Image (cartoon, rainbow, N blue to C red):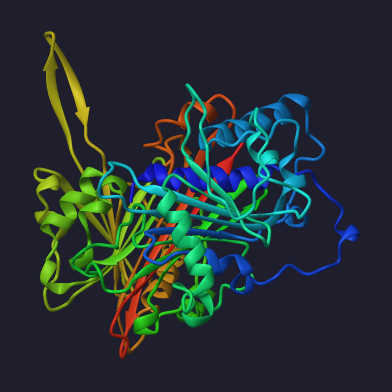
Amino acid sequence: MKLRVVAIILLLSLLLFFGFKKVSANKNKEQSTNIEQLNILKYIPENNKLLFISNFDSFHIDNNNEKDKNSTNQDDFVLIKDSILDYLGIDLGNNKLGDIYNNELIISFFENNKKLKDDILIIFKIKPEKTIDDLLNLPNKIDQIDEIISINRENKINFLNYIYRTDDNYIIASSDKKLIKNSINSSNDFKEKNFQYEGELVGLNNEKNILFTKKFGKSIFFNKEIFTENNGNNIATTFDFKNKQLILKSYLLNNKKNIDILNYDKLLNKENSNEDNHENLIFCDTKNFDKHLNPFVNDFQLSFFEEFNQNNNQNILILNSNKDWLITFEKNNKDQFDLSSLKKLKDFNKYTLKQNEDIYSIYSKDILGEKDDVIKQLSFEKIYSIESGGLQIISNHLIDGKEFEKISKKFFNLKSKKDKSGFLYSKVDIKENNSNEIEYFSNLQDLNFLIRNILKISNEESLEIISQSIPEKNPIIYRETILNIL
């Protein structure tokens, strides 16, 4: 799946979040339809590679910017909305999106072997009094129902080439005329077959925006060794916007293997966020330390993993912040790891102090060097070790008793996720609040320039967990990404 496909989905989601005026909920007390009961589902053809479903409406916008709104911000959001619609080939003219859209939306992508890019199919419900003319704003008026109409705009980007209006007020638009025909046929046969993601929707009824894909966009644990292709796996990602943050939660689901959203209840109920201001938290066993984790650890930690006894398959906890870092693991009395033998500590001086049952060690190295006929003292980073209560912590700073107790509690809490029947549990929690490179937007070419001077988007935090217990035959993966939208 191309990242720019996901980017379009995200941008359209933002369009929905910002595209409506705030309306008082007191004007409409009706409850929204559960997403699995939407009538629009009947128009989805099978074998799509990506599917976005939404019943988002203007009554669920969490508008926290009411006090600091200004005309510049409003104009910027209008520019984003109009730019995205122009990219698709839609021209609202003097119409407002909120006056046309009627709270049901489908966006899906299909492989096209004859083209280099995928084909898109967009379906959405409009209000009964609205027509195709209100969407296209073409010189020649169009008011046909049940007829596929070609969209032609000279010298303009035109992602959508055909459009169709059903007799029950749904607009079907696509880059390929054949997809519209397939959508119409799907609606005619809907009662005779099940919806493609019917099983995966279990437990997601109250969600407003759901994205179904076959793979995680960029995953640490989702790899071909564990998850083979064409095995029925689907990734469901939900979207929510709160306090100027877009929150994406992704779940690996497999209806054939009875992996649904309920499998994640126990896992997520016990999870805590990455507190204590650590930027990186990594918990995994040494055999599952993957090359994808390399960007999140420093040179010393990489050397440690290379020389640590892999046969022990011990659990490792890594906590990194701007300046401080540490590695925590259980001591193995049968095959004790000797930190002094680490190549990174060659020629370091070691001093050890024992306090009760705790053993503190410091590794230091100071040498003299010559540069430009000047003798200088060269000091290397000091490495500290503390052994206590069956744990050993290696760090670049001296850890006191209170900090050790906190780290020990965190380590054994994470280890407890592997209960007696559990044999796989790894967690990576990365805070990236200083990063302006957005994974889902990084490869966007045609649309990226439209938002770079209007919205500032940055990664706040990324969490990924993989877990498996006996008698489960397959692991589950949960991923959460928080993006700041400023």
Q: Position of residue 195 (x, y in %)?
A: 48, 74
In the rendered image, the residue lying farthest to the top is 372
Q: Position of residue 111 (x, y in %)?
A: 32, 53
Residue at image point 39% right, 37% down? 442
In the picture provided, is 462 more to the left or to the right than 125?
Answer: left
Q: Position of residue 481 (x, y in %)?
A: 48, 53
- Look at the picture and state if 392 lies above or below 170: below
Determine the image quadrant of residue 149: top right
Residue at image point 32% right, 70% down? 388
Q: Who is closer to the viewer here, 77 or 184?
A: 184
- Look at the picture and state if 254 lies above or below 128: below
From where the camera sits, is residue 114 visible?
A: yes
Q: Position of residue 315 (x, y in %)?
A: 27, 70
- Look at the picture and state if 151 lies above or below 71: below
Determine the image quadrant of residue 474: bottom left
In the rendered image, the residue lying farthest to the right is 26
Q: Who is closer to the viewer here, 245 or 49?
A: 49
Residue at image point 48% right, 55% down? 180
Q: Who is closer to the viewer here, 281 or 448?
A: 448
From where the camera sits, is residue 480 visible?
A: no
